[in-house]
Amino acid sequence: MSRSRREKSAASLTDSSIAIRIRDIILDKMIFTPILVAIFMTFINGILSKSVELTFELPDSAVECFYEEIEKNTSAALEYQVITGGQYDVDVKIEGPNKQIIYQQQKMQYDSHQFTTQMTGIYKVCFSNEFSTFSHKLVYMELNVGPEKPLPGVGDHATVLTQLETSAEEIHSALNRIIDHQTHHRLREAQGRKRAEDLNERVFWWSMGESLAIVCVTFIQVMVLKNFFSDRPTLYNRM
């Protein structure tokens, strides 16, 4: 009987309660240093936080939309960047549950927009490449909804945080900033590499065309000079 109760209790644990239990074990037994604790908490917080971050392909003459249910009076932030394709631009639109246009831009390479929801419902973020008939694009987007949640169990304290918890909070914030900087650097590196590859390809084919043109011009010049010095019967020779 007790075994079945334990199994039922273990099955009913949520991700949040599991994270809190592991966190209490770490803090009570002092197994890890503050840096390892902060890394673990950053991972747990990333699982529990309501954030969407992805990179997707946008075909030519196509529209891709993403949907997110958001509560009223909740802050949200959208950030996007075109990594590859065409002129590195895209049309973007954020639409509310009542079809109200919250944000709309045309042919943008990158941008960010923060807004506060006026009602509860499903919000739509659309990326359009309808103006392009040949080139498909690779787009990065990140949608953050609501404030960042505190580390699991931190809000349960009635007293001030311990030194270990304070250090974990500071390192957690620093790690979040590092992750954000790394993401932006990877995007810029990918965009720069693609531009360099495209430029290298254009230079290669332009050089091949110039080389072929030089060969053709050389051949034509040789034939013209050869005709100048060839022996032709003249009227004087015939007489």
Image: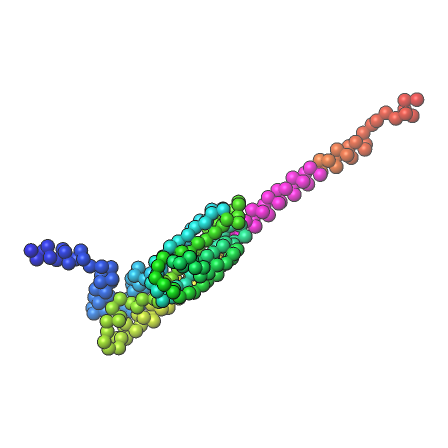
Give the image location of residue 225, x and y in percent.
78, 35
The secondary structure making up most of the magenta span is: helix
User: Is residue 103 found inside the magenta-colored segment of the image?
Assistant: no
Give the image location of residue 179, x and y in percent.
39, 62
Magenta span:
193-217
**Quadrant location of the C terminus?**
top right
Q: Is residue 6 left or right of residue 120?
A: left
Q: Nearer the viewer, residue 215 or 166?
A: 166
* Residue at the (12%, 57%) spot, across then down: 6
Q: Is residue 173 left or right of residue 210?
A: left
Give the image location of residue 45, x and y in percent.
31, 63
- Residue that sits furthest to the front in the current view: 98
User: Is residue 199 found inside the magenta-colored segment of the image?
Assistant: yes
Location of residue 141 by image quarter: bottom left
- Residue that sits furthest to the left in the current view: 1
**Quadrant location of the N terminus?**
bottom left
Q: Nearer the viewer, residue 221 or 122?
A: 122
Q: Nearer the viewer, residue 103 or 26?
A: 103
Location of residue 5 by image quarter: bottom left
* Residue at the (92%, 25%) spot, across then down: 236
